[in-house]
Image (spheres, rainbow, N blue to C red):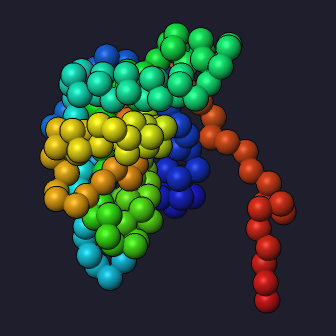
Amino acid sequence: MNETLQTIAQRSSTRAYTEEKLTEAEIQAILTAGLQAPTARNEQEIHIAAFDGEHPLLAEIEQEKRALLAAAAEGEAKESIINAPHNFYYEAPAVFILSADRDFMWGSLDAGIAVENMALAAEALGLGSVIIGIIKGAMDGSKKAYFAKECRFPENYEFEIALAVGHKAAEKKPHAFDMEKSVTIIK
């Protein structure tokens, strides 16, 4: 099987990481893969903020995420959010937060393409990753300007998606799919 197709086939979301840090070469390879992604009209508007998993801003984002989710939940659901055993990035040693110009109509799509490139690059490097959207409420909420400033988003940019990356502490089989249910071939 083609190496690229094999990487796509074996990639799955990783939700358990070792404490081993990524090398500078691994970080640069992942960033490069994200920046090599195609963008609408070749705008190349995606901005990537790269964080060490121990950066205090990530804990602030986690706290805001939990507070917002807990405020919307009740009973057992609220308790499970408050006492969740993992943060939004599953304690990964590296987190990449992607943003795009809020006035460019294709920014969200471009960020999605970029983050998939980054996730596939991580897999090709023998690393695990998980694509993250659960912090959208926190990133777009009352602390939006603060988080944007701390992530050093360019002016008029906003959160789109994030990626956690690290060395896998657990293996997970890629998800199964039903071709007949999910695809219609029109001739």
Q: Residue furthest right?
A: 180
Q: Is residue 35 above or below residue 55?
A: below
**Along the horizontal axis of the image, is 26 left or right of 166?**
left
Task: Report x, y in % for residue 25.
Answer: 18, 41
Q: Is residue 142 visible?
A: yes
Name the residue rendered at 53%, 53% in the picture.
8
Horizontally, residue 6 falls left or right of residue 92, namely: right
Quarter of the figure with the N terminus = bottom right
- Please tell me in which quadrant of the rendered image residue 34 appears: bottom left
- Residue 129 position, x and y percent, is 43, 37
- The residue that appears at 33% across and 38% down in the rendered structure is 142
Residue occupying image coordinates x 37% and y 22%: 63
Residue 35 is situated, as x and y percent measured from the top left of the image, at: 26, 61
In the rendered image, residue 110, in percent from the top left (x then y), is placed at: 39, 66
Q: Nearer the viewer, residue 110 or 71?
A: 71
Quarter of image, res 54: top left
Q: In which quarter of the image is the C terminus?
A: bottom right
**Outermost residue toward the bottom?**
187
The vertical placement of 36 against 24, above or below, is below
Q: Can residue 96 be seen in this view?
A: no
Residue pictured at 24% horizontal, 51% vertical: 48
